[in-house]
Amino acid sequence: MIIRSLKNQLVKNSENVIGLYQSLHQWGSTCPCHGTPIAQCSNPPSQSLQTNHVSPVFISTSTSNAILSSPSPSSSSSTSSYNRSVYNNASVSSIRHDMDLIQKFGSWSSDNRATRRYSSGIIVEPSQTEYAFEMATSNIKFGPGCTHEIGQDLIDLKIKNVCVFADPHLLAMSTTGTGGESPVSVVLHSLKKAGINFVIYSNISIEPTDESFKDAIEFVKNARIPIEGFVAVGGGSTIDTCKAANLYTTFPTDNFLDYVNPIIGLGKPVPGPVKPLIAVPTTAGTGSETTGVSVFDLLELKAKTGIAHKNLKPTLGIVDPHNTFTMPTNVAVASGFDQLCHALESYTAIPYNKRTRTPIRPAYQGSNPISDIWSLKALEMINEYLPTAIENPTDLNARSQVMLAATSAGIGFGNAGVHLCHGMSYAVSGLVRDYKPEGYNVDYPIIPHGMSVCLNAPAVFEFTASANPARHLECARLMGANINNVKDQDAGKILSNQIRKLMKRLKIPDGLKAINYTKDDIPALVQGTLPQHRVTKLSPRPVGVEELTKLFENSMTIY
């Protein structure tokens, strides 16, 4: 009777929560168990609270990139009707309200190991786990000097009018002649030689924002020539900005948040193919030339988020090691640790066949046999060549191998996904107050993406190792550790120590404290991480407020 009474009370409480959400008539009214807009939530809060109200899972038509917590495959449930109207207008105040509710109602159940992608209006049984995975990437051209061929590449695509997105520093080098054969000058010369008409956009933020994206979109809309395709020459910020401008000018929308990942955005799918884009990376880290991901800061919320869809993948990535010689040392270091975490996270992510099956597979599907090959090869190359590429930057072979590793890791994580290092990094970089890194030509505070990612890495992999010690030990071996006769329970510590050694050698700051965070900032960092379901739900171990708090505490100092 005590158990029955407690269960009845739990049901009553969950019904009260449902009533609360049904009464909120703004877009963004958020389910406390999943963090998705309640109008798009596949399960009413009662299911998360184990009251077994819902059985078939409705997949909402309005979100396509959300990866959310779902019931364990063994859960039983029965059908329940629910208000699923989709609200088209989002406001910053409603999003803030969502985040407050997430914080109030707490973490996700540790039993919820499966992940779900919400896409189209189809019924899917929660007990059905994924049985297949897909691989997709951009076409890649690799080799020293291959940037000179870009004019011919555009001719082959039958494109005559392009918008060139150029890193402003590299553009300045090309116009003043101070950079010799800078990547931008090589591209422009090739375009002229091929008779390609072009306009140049260079007002690009080192860490893109919604405002910088919108500025780029307006430039393309008002270009003096009809834009048939795009060329992006620069790091991940340049390529991501170009992806966004391509999307919003090919498929305009009145609401900028339409394509943005839930819960911050509506997560609407990209309606079709965008215009051809050739990406010419000049850093070795982001892998943006291979992925359909575009990341930015939403300024008013101080939150980093992004857009993710396979249609955003560049048509061609030109991976030319010569283009990385313009990187300042600290940019090369941060970029290198970004690709290191891409490889580590994608290999240790939740396996693809542990996700709940859905009608359309997500871009980030979980670790899988093919992504594993790319991720592990990248990790091996990074460990061997990154220190040399940083300490002897004129070593073409080391630069070439690190550049190739970045692309390999991009192919790996572009299909498997990343998890906690990246999920936590979005809060770290989004809440920056006054840190200005050396080697970055900015007059405002930023925390470079690769730095914000790797500062959490030692704590993260010590935490996740218990989910799959063998995979963590394999990563440690590829990073130089002797794993003979090592116990499974030591896997996390061994891998984390290898990461620390590399971070210390390449002079990464000693934890969050070194970039001016204190323990008082941890609640805000946790709150900023909770909405990042697209990546955090790929963690091999589920996390909520308590786990994230501990991870941030353990990341305050590293060495």
Image: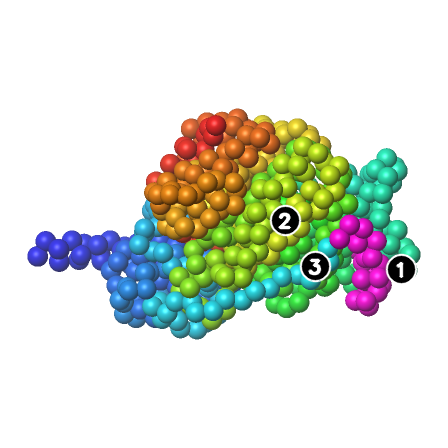
Nearest-to-viewer mark from 1 and 3:
3
User: Can you give x and y, in whole percent of width and height, for residue 136 in the image?
Assistant: 60, 64
Residue 216 in the figure: left or right of residue 413 = right
Q: Amino acid at mark 1?
A: Ala
Q: How many marks?
A: 3
- Mark with earlier residue (1, 3): 3
Asked where in the image residue 338 lies, by quadrant, the reply is: top right
Q: Nearer the viewer, residue 215 or 125?
A: 125
Task: Give the Cα distance between marks 2 and 1.
Answer: 29 Å
Residue 149 among those drawn in magenta: yes
Q: Quadrant of the N terminus?
A: bottom left
Q: Which mark is residue 140?
A: 3
The residue singled out by tag 1 in the image is 194
Q: CA distance from mark 1 to mark 3?
A: 21 Å
Is 15 inside the magenta-drawn segment? no
Pick out the residue farthest to the front: 484
Mark 2, residue position? 406
Residue depicted at 64% across the width and 52% down the height: 407
Disc 2 marks a residue whose amino acid type is: Ala
Q: Which residues are magenta?
A: 143-164
